[in-house]
Image: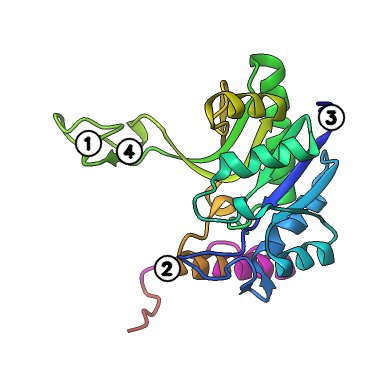
Amino acid sequence: MNFSGTIAHIPARGGSKRVPKKNLRLMAGQPMMSYAVREALLASGLDAVYVNTDDADMAALGEALGAKVHHRPPHLAVDEAGSDDFNAEIISTLQPQTLVMINPVCPLITAQDIEQALQAYRQAREADGVDTLIAASMTHMQTFCEGKPVNVSVEEGLRPSQENPEVAVLNWAVSIWDAPAFLDRYQRFGFGVWGSRRLLYRLPVLQAAKVSDEGDFLLCEALLLARRQQQEHGAKAPVFWAPGQPVDA
C-alpha cells in the first residue's frame, strides 16, 4: 500500500438506539452532524474531509456541506461493527498516512480544536514516537469504578479535590492515528484504536460535550445557542449579587 496525506472522517451510521436519527436531528436549527463537518472543513492541515456513512440522507448532507462521502459497506453498518472495524476499512480503502476521526456527537468541537490536536499529535509523534491521540476530559474529582476508588483512598479523610491524582475520561471528540500502524495492529490483533504509544489529549469540557442521550442533546443545544449569542453580542462580564439587592422569590 502507498500511504500518504492526512484525511479526516466523520463516522455517521444511520441507526441509533438511544437517540434515533440523532445525526440528522436539528440542533439549534442545524442537523447535529453538520457542526462537526463544517468545523473539519474549516480546519487547516487536512487534505480531505469525508462523511463515513451507510445512510443516503447523511451522505447527501455531507455533500451539501462540501465534504466527500465514503460509503460504508453494509457489514459495517450494524451495531456489532465497532470503531476498530470502520476505521480499519477506511484506512484500507483511502490509504492515508494520518487518519483523523471527528465525532459527530460532539457538536461543540471547533476547527481550532482540530488544528491544535493535530499539532499536538505531530509534535508528540516526532518527540516520543506517539502513534495515537485520543481526546479526553480531565478531572481531579473523586472517581470510583465498580465501587472501588480510582484516585482516592477510603482509608483516610477527604482531601481537597485538587490534591487527587488527575483522571482522564475519554470523550473521543477527536482522535488521530498513524494509519499504517493502526492497520497493522488491526490485522494482527483485531483492534487498533488504542495504539502502541498514545497521547491522551486534554480537550476542554465545553468543546468535548457528547450526545449519548436526550439530556445530552438538550444540553449541547443550549450550549450552542449560548455560544452563538456570545459571538453575536460579545461576552458578558460576570455579575454578582450583593447584600441589599432584591432576591426574586
Toward the viewer: 230 or 58?
A: 58
Residue at which label 1 appears: 148
Residue 204 located within the stretch drawn in magenta: no
Q: Kindly state the secondary structure of the residue where label 4 is placed.
A: helix
Give the label, 3 or 2, closer to the camera.
3
Q: Which residue is drawn at 64% across and 24% down?
A: 184
Circle 1 residues within 10 Å: few <14, some 14–19, many ≥20: few
Toward the viewer: 231 or 132?
A: 132
Residue at which label 3 appears: 4
Give the label, 4 or 2, closer to the camera.
4
Q: Where is residue 104 in the image (x, y as percent from the top left)?
A: 63, 56
Q: Magenta region: which residues?
A: 222-243
For the C terminus, the image quarter is bottom left
**Which image quarter: residue 95?**
top right
Q: What is the total number of numbered labels drawn onto the structure image? A: 4
User: Which three-letter amino acid code belongs to the residue tagged 2?
Assistant: Trp
**Which image quarter: residue 127?**
top right
The disc at residue 161 is 4
